[in-house]
Every structure is written in C-alpha cells, then in structure tokens.
Image (spheres, rainbow, N blue to C red):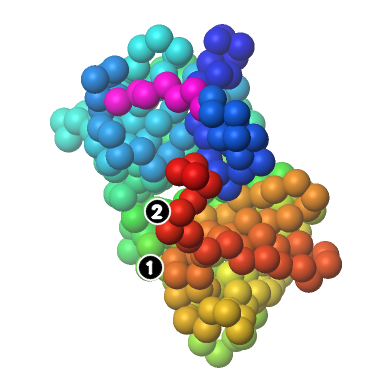
Amino acid sequence: MENALQPLLFLLVLHGSIQLSQAASSGKIPFVHLTTERGLSQNTVHAVFQDKSGFIWFGTQDGLNRFDGYSFTTFEQDPQDTTTISDNFVRAIVEDLAGNLWIATQDGLNRFDPDTERFSHYQNDPRKANSISANNINSLCLDRTAILWIATQGGGLNQMNPTTGEVSQIRHDPSDSKSLRHDNVISLFEDQSGTLWIGTAAGLQAAPPSRREFVFHDLKDEQVKDDAANVVVLISKEAYRKRLFATQNGGVIAYNPRQGWRKRYHHSPAPFLHQ
C-alpha cells in the first residue's frame, strides 16, 4: 500500500524547493490532480497526512477524506450520530502511537478509531478546567514524549495525554514575559532537539524540551519592521538544521537557531516556475 501511495505525496515548496527547482529546470513537473471530480469532498484542502497504513488523508473545508490510491472515502458530520466527526472544516491531522488519528476542526478535537471508524469528541466545557480551552483548533503536534499539543483560536495552547484524555491549558499571562505571547496560536512544530516551536498572533516562541518557559524569537529586522512579520502561519524544517517560518507579511524565513543565522525570502513578481 505504501509503495502505491508514495508517488501521490503532495509537493510543498517549503519542503522541497531544491527538488522542485531541479524539476523546473528540466521542464518536467508531473502533477496528479485530485479534485471533486475524482471524489474529493471539497477542493479547499487544509491538511494532508499519510498514516502508518499508507492511506493519505485530506482535511477540507467540507469533510475529511481518506484516499487509498484509487478512490476516496469521505467522513462527514451527521448531527443525528454522535460517532461522526464533530465538524466538516478540518485544519490538521496527526496519528498517535496507538494508530488513532487526531483531527482538528473548527468545532472541536476528534479522535478517529481506524478499527471501528468512529469518532470521539473533545470540546470545551466551561464547567471543566481540564477540557480543551476552545473548540476552534488551528494546528496539532504530537511530540516525542507522545503528548498532543493543541493550538486554538483564542484559547491559547493545550497539552493532552492521548491515552487518558487529560488536558492542561496554557494561556497568555500579561504579567509574565516568558508565558505564551498570545492566546491565538496558529502553528506548531517540534524539531529534532525536542524544541516545540509555536507560532502565535503576537510572535514566534520556542519551548525547550523541559517546556518550562517560552522563548520569544523576534522575526522583524531592518527589512521588515511590520508587526505582521511576527505572525507565523506555518512552521517546517529544511536540511542542515534550518527551520522555515512562513509569516503573514514578512515572507518565508530560513533560520538556524544554533548559529543565529537567518535569511528572508520575499514574493517575486516573476517566480522561477514561470521563467
């Protein structure tokens, strides 16, 4: 199954700029289009994930889709069935050590059991301090200790034990400069050292493996002084221990935290794909 699906893995410039550039120079870039005409539930895709069995999952604005290399199976909300997904707008997908999928939606967190194909819901309950802090979820990250990190819109950062379902809420504290900078958490990424990188609406932060503090990394410089340059919407990795940060108004930044080296990439009106 994995060999059949591997050629269909999506291309992102952030992940494969060198390979894509080489393909562009040769004039041969093969793309397979998977749209609603092929069975996808909706064409706006926010999440792509390959599970341990080789299936590729697509989170769209109207449904969760599983692709086996030939056809799609769609999972959609049914208000009359509590074992279906809690919302059709899917933003992120991860898999835990037990093989369960965790799915972030605009209305809650879902755990999908691949054996029963049923969903369990985790939503905010104001009466319970150990529930997730907000239902609108932007990103997920399962770290090396098997803790699930949940980035919410307006509810800060949550950490969950996937086995027990126990949740701890982490919020912005104006009186603590080492706390979370903003309760709107947009993106998450754990690097090889175990550092958790957190993109918020007020800047980029890094939590070392101890998770005892949040260190702010200012992405503004002489080129870009706009506060929007610190709004990190996507975090990824590149070779040679570099991190890639896609910002709201400051381009893409390649950053090596060990050396303190960084380089900013801006939009060009004549990108190499059209040269």
Q: Which residue is the extreme one toward the front?
A: 275
Which residue does the image show at 40% across and 31% down from the upper left?
58
State which quarter of the image contains the N terminus. top right
Q: Is residue 99 left or right of residue 87?
A: right
Say few, some or many: other residues with alpha carbon within 10 Å of mark 2 (under 14 / 14 to 19 / 20 or more). many
Q: Amino acid at mark 1?
A: Gly
Q: Amino acid at mark 2?
A: Ile
Percent x, y of residue 153: 38, 62
- Give the alpha-carbon distance from disc 2 to disc 1, as whole Å: 9 Å
Q: Is residue 112 left or right of residue 256?
A: left
Check if residue 14 falls in the magenta segment: no
In the rendered image, the vertical position of residue 49 relative to residue 72, given as above or below? below
SS class, disc 2? strand
Which residue does the image show at 44% across and 66% down from the upper left?
248
Percent x, y of residue 190: 67, 52
Percent x, y of residue 20: 59, 36
Residue 223 circle label:
none
Q: Which residue is the extreme one toward the left?
A: 80
Decide if residue 127 is in sight here: no
Say few, some or many: other residues with alpha carbon within 10 Å of mark 1 (under 14 / 14 to 19 / 20 or more). some
Q: Which residues are magenta?
A: 29-35
Which residue does the image show at 45% across and 70% down from the upper left?
249
Decide if residue 57 is in sight here: yes
Q: Which residue is mark 2?
A: 137
In the rendered image, the vertical position of residue 55 relative to residue 250, given as above or below? above
Q: Quarter of the image holding residue 61? A: top left
Could you tell me what secondary structure mostly forms the magenta stretch?
loop
Check if residue 32 falls in the magenta segment: yes
In the rendered image, the vertical position of residue 249 relative to residue 134, given as above or below? below
Which residue does the image show at 39% across and 53% down from the upper left?
137
Residue 154 circle label:
1
